Image (cartoon, helix red, strand yellow):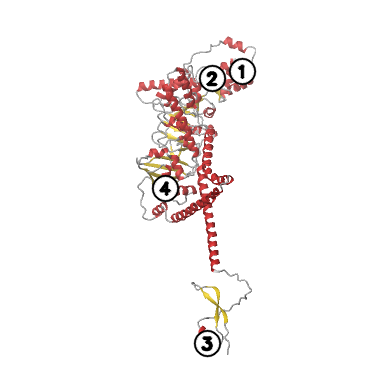
Amino acid sequence: MVQETTTRHLHAVPDESEVPTGLVWHDEPSDHEPETQHSGTTPVSGRVMPASEADTSLTPAQADRAQITDRLRASLEAANTYALLAWHRKWDVAMSHVMDPSLRQDMIDEAEAALDAKIASTEKKLRRAINPEDTTKLSKQLDRLNRREISTLEIDARVVRTRTTRLAGKCVLPASVIVGPVLLAMSGTWIGLLAWPAAWGWLAVQGRAMARADVKTTATDTATSRIEARARELTAPTTVAATTAAVAATVVGASDDENQILSRLSNWEELATARGLDGTTPGDPVLAETGLSVVVTCAGRITPEALIKKTNAVRSLLGVPTGIALDIVQGERGDQALVRIRTRTPQRDMEWQPGKEDVGVDVTTGEVVDLEVYHRMLIAGASRSGKTVMMRVLMAKVVADPNACLILIDAKRVEAARWRHVARTACTPDEISGLAAELKWEMTRRYEEISETGRAWVPSPEKKRMVIVVDEGAELIAMDHKELGILENLRSLAMMGGEAEMHLWWCTQKPTKTGDGRGIDSAIAGQMTGALVCLRTTSPTEARTVLGEDANAAGWNSHLLERAGLALIRDGERGPDPVAVWNLSDEEKVLALPPQTRWGLPDAEVHEPVTEPEETEAEEAEEDEGQGDGNWIGAQHAVMQALHTGPKTTAQLQEITGYSKSMIHNALGQHEAAGKVVKGPGHRAAWRAL
């Protein structure tokens, strides 16, 4: 009897994907069985596992659990990444809100609005006051409020307080989520610890949504945007000229700031709602040599005037850096406003040189700007705003005209010292009072001549037109009193001097008409109809004082000028486009101007009261007695020292130096021949050093 034996071979068992994943045992008959039974199966070489060896292979259930664990771990890692993404994004948004660059301007507007509200409230109380004591008290309070200026320290304090409040508001929720569960756990409420995974899960969901949005945004950005499509349309051979006020933009060569602004501009409709700018639609932006500009069409209740008042909102919407100027003006049509962003400064030589007849460059268009100087003019600007440089450029135009002469009244004396070789100057109260009287007399004489001939005053080298410049108007107002009569004569000149070709310029650092420190005489300011020139001011109120009550609404915002040397010129022809003035800060260029014949009335036409008794020859001889030839060199030195402190009459020089009248006369004669001193008009006028 033949015993049947069975051998076991390892065979590969394919899964559904035809990939061997394991080995199974198959019983195979002995060699005596026909091989045809296994003709379809190929033996696989392998190792027979002894029964004593441990089987470490994964069972199907274990493999499923491992796969689930791996997937769960990957999901948790992805969720943690999304949570971190959401946290970083929200923190960036919070910090952008806290450190908003337009916050400082908002605080300035808020402080000025609060001050205006106090002034209006005080004025209302003053009108209703009946008791004289209340009236006096409220009047003093109103004067203090009118003189008050918003200090930098107050603005800084408001900015710090607002940023602190914003930061606290943004941090209160994360702090409660972190600390709250700990406090609950300490009190025995352990379920509060679930707030942590809940917050983590909420951040993960938010982060996943942000990531999906980024993917969509990236896909949109890589596609053709509206600006890029319009740019390619312009470069195509079939380009059609734009018919609107603004032409299409080109992003070729744009800076990082400009690209960011253009990106925000392309999403204007989405961002406008949050900024209160519903109903506004931007046109195609223009990138020119001075920067970006875009026409915004206003619809609904918002008008171009309302959009001008929302300049800060537009700046925030477009993300314009604080160092870049942005202004909004009326467009070509009634429903259009033009937004101009000066991201570029054209390379131009801004140094003043002799022969330049214009005053500067329009920073928006890049065009050279000229200004007619032969009319009444009001020039104002805060300290360090470039007012002196503007005055120099304008006065240099007058000096270069052979048919004109310049007269400078400078109570501070500094600028007068630089112009005395080309202009008649007056600095002290007595000098200014005498000069004002001479000017009024000259105006009267000219009108008498005009009335006799019936012909207008035609300027010529013999009959020059006159420009009278009053520098530091606040100092002049402070020094004047009834006996001097300075303002009285200058008011007459401002009101009547135009036809006589005598033009008054009033310049001041304090553009206010009320208060003890006012810098503009209200009667004179009302006559300044020729040109209004305003450099940077400290508040919108001062801008309105100089440029008119409608200045802020019309876009004449001198308090928003970003740097010194920019001026707004309102002369009936220009719009509110800042002008970069030629740089004439170098006083050496002023001192190098060719000397001019300075204006003065002939001695015969000066009608001054005789205040000093005439001395006889005997009295002069008595004064000279005992001095003989004397120390003439010492007398000359003493006279020059005395004149360096200010103009002096002959009698004053005698009293100061102690020398006789004849020695003083000889010393003055020697200095006058050498060109070191000059005498004012009039028989007993004061001498002054050159």
Kindly identify the amino acid type of the residue bearing the numbered disc 4. Answer: Glu
Q: Quadrant of residue 545?
A: top left
Taking the image as shown, residue 283 lies to the left or right of residue 606, namely left
Which one is in front in this view, the residue at disc 4 or the one at disc 1? 4
**Is the residue under label 1 in contact with that under label 4 (CB below 8 Å)?**
no
User: How far across and how far down the image is residue 517, in percent?
Assistant: 50, 25
Residues packed near mark 4 inside 10 Å, few (<14), some (14 to 19) or many (20 plus): few
Which one is in front in this view, the residue at disc 2 or the one at disc 4? 4
Q: CA distance from mark 2 to mark 4?
A: 73 Å
**Is the residue under label 2 in contact with that under label 1 (CB below 8 Å)?**
no
Position of 315 relative to 653 (above/below): below
Q: Nearer the viewer, residue 343 or 312?
A: 312
Please identify the residue farthest to the front as the structure is shown: 1
Q: CA distance from mark 1 to mark 2?
A: 15 Å
Judge whether residue 408 can be spotted in this image. Answer: no
Q: CA distance from mark 3 to mark 4?
A: 83 Å
User: How far across and how far down the image is residue 182, in percent?
Assistant: 58, 46
Quadrant location, the N terminus: bottom right
**Is the residue under label 3 in contact with that under label 1 (CB below 8 Å)?**
no
The residue that disc 4 covers is: 270
Judge whether residue 508 can be spotted in this image. Answer: yes
User: Which label is found at residue 657?
Assistant: 1
Of the residues under marks 1 and 2, which one precedes in the sequence? 1
Residues packed near mark 1 inside 10 Å, few (<14), some (14 to 19) or many (20 plus): some
Of the residues under marks 2 and 4, which one precedes in the sequence? 4
The residue that disc 3 covers is: 34
Q: CA distance from mark 1 to mark 3?
A: 152 Å
Of the residues under marks 3 and 4, which one precedes in the sequence? 3
Kindly identify the amino acid type of the residue bearing the numbered disc 1. Answer: Thr
